[in-house]
Image (cartoon, coloured by chain):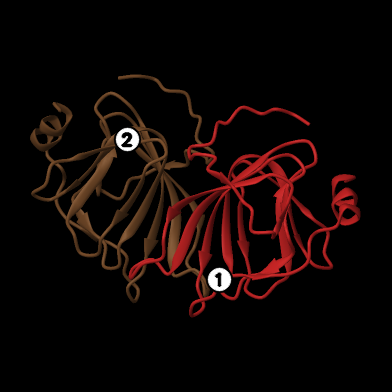
Chain colours: A red, B brown
Amino acid sequence: MTTDPNTSPFPKGEKITNGYFTGNAFLTPLLARDKNNDFVLVNVTFEAGARTNWHTHPKGQVLLVTEGVGFYQEKGKPAQRIKTGDVVNIPELVEHWHGASATHKLVHIAITNYQGDNNVVWLSPVSDEEYTEVNKH
Amino acid sequence: MTTDPNTSPFPKGEKITNGYFTGNAFLTPLLARDKNNDFVLVNVTFEAGARTNWHTHPKGQVLLVTEGVGFYQEKGKPAQRIKTGDVVNIPELVEHWHGASATHKLVHIAITNYQGDNNVVWLSPVSDEEYTEVNKH
């Protein structure tokens, strides 16, 4: 595991303890939904090895990677390696996960659109077997 | 003028030549409007001294400052100094400008919402007198 310095523009924030992440992930709220912005804006920091559960978004999500190296994987497809400067436009209703690589942190801004009052449906954890397989490549 | 290194996550992009900026400003498109995302995402780099014209947004805009120091000013109000890590939620229809300070670059992501097919109305330049006054403080 590397101990990358924090070079992201936004604070690391508080550890996420909602049960939908594996490993150490941290969140800073940047902007709440309001009358003009039909999305929520957060900054998420995944320490090496940390990742989301599998999940879907009813109206999609955009990730802006501000630091580090990690993965984005849609169910049934090969994982995509993502890094600083990448933009990921996640379609609606597609089961997927994202997170750090086994050896580097990943930091991204997330813009999560709302469909009515919902913006995410959480599913099962990304197993160690699934995660190890992705990190082999 | 300082010569700050580029530590932003996103590329500096191409010089803006649309006539609505003063000084050297650069833009990288990050994401176009689509069926899920009712906004356009860009990265804007203002070299020291550069700024937008006065303008309005029909459905507001969010700025995420990723590097440097600059200003955000609404017409008739004192300018706000903005810096790395700041989030500016610009209301709809409020005349304002943003840009670098006279001595430092400013880099921000902009999330610009659409009202129908429009997302900005450009007005007159920020005069050298207006800009000098703001930089005194």
Is B80 in front, or is A122? A122
Chain of the residue displaying label 2:
B
Position of residue A2 measured from the top left corner of the image (x, y, whole percent): 74, 29
Give the mark count: 2
Residue found at the very far bottom of the displayed protein: A116
Quadrant in which residue B83 is drawn:
top left
Q: CA distance from mark 1 to mark 2?
A: 39 Å
Asked whether, in this view, residue A81 is left or right of residue B40, the answer is right
Contact (Cβ within 8 Å) of mark 1 with mark 2:
no
Identity of the amino acid at label 1?
Asn
Position of residue B132 measured from the top left corner of the image (x, y, whole percent): 13, 30
Asked whether, in this view, residue A37 is left or right of residue B59, the answer is right
- Label 2, residues with CA under 10 Å away: few <14, some 14-19, many ≥20: some
Asked whether, in this view, residue A103 is left or right of residue B5, the answer is right
Chain of the residue displaying label 1:
A
- Helix, strand or loop at mark 1: loop
Q: Tell me what residue is drawn at x 64 percent, y 53 percent.
A: A17
Q: In the image, are marks 1 and 2 on the same chain?
A: no
Q: Tell me what residue is drawn at x 55 percent, y 31 percent.
A: A7
- Helix, strand or loop at mark 2: loop
Q: Is residue B60 above or below residue B136?
A: below
Is B94 in front, or is B16? B94
Position of residue A91 measured from the top left corner of the image (x, y, whole percent): 63, 70
Position of residue A128 measured from the top left corner of the image (x, y, whole percent): 87, 52
Q: Tell me what residue is drawn at x 25 percent, y 48 percent.
A: B19
Q: Tell me what residue is drawn at x 53 percent, y 36 percent.
A: A8
The residue labelled by disc 1 is A119
Tag shown at residue B24: 2
Query: Which is in the foreground here, disc 1 or disc 2?
Result: 1
Viewport quadrant of the N terminus of chain A: top right
